[in-house]
Image: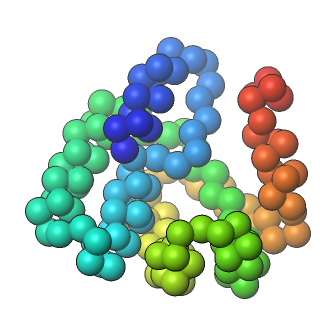
Amino acid sequence: MRSRFAGWRAQENSPRLIFDRSVDEDFHVFCRMHWEAGLLGDLQYEHLRELSQTLQSAMPEPDLILFICPERRILAERVTEDSHPPLIVRRLDRQVDLYADWLSKRRNDILRLDNSACSLEAIRRMFAEDRGC
């Protein structure tokens, strides 16, 4: 969360910012998943909640959340193929549920894109830094 905040601070005067993930998402999806799995204690989780709230209060709300995700079956194949950490692979269904919960509580505009028929390389090229975006 601190590195995302630092990244925003370094670019806060740019006319257009695009971030892969957010402080809010980090807390509500990843910290919660790690807490539920027993990898974070209650005090650690509460500290991360407070940190998340502090950092978010200094940042503007996003104009748009672009949520790019394939169908669950495709996602499971990609996560396994890309050798993600075992916790992510084993708890993929829970992570998807946490994302759905997080998105349902957002008041921002949300654009959901199903990238099931799109290669990961095509997405990487689309968001490459040299594209002038």
- Could you tell me how many numbered marks the image carries? 0
**Front residue of 77 and 110:** 77
The quadrant holding residue 71 is: bottom right
Whole-percent x and y of residue 43? 11, 62
Whole-percent x and y of residue 24? 38, 51
Q: Quadrant of the N terminus?
A: top left
- Work out whether 48 lies above or below 20: below
Colouring: rainbow
- Work out whether 12 lies above or below 66: above
Whole-percent x and y of residue 95? 49, 74
Left or right relative to 52: residue 17: right
The quadrant holding residue 42 is: bottom left
Q: Quadrant of the C terminus?
A: top right
Left or right relative to 108: residue 50: left
- Work out whether 78 lies above or below 58: below
Q: Is residue 104 visible?
A: no
At a point 68% along the width and 76% down the height, the residue shown is 80
At a point 50% along the width and 40% down the height, the residue shown is 62
Whole-percent x and y of residue 40? 24, 68
**Front residue of 82 and 75:** 82
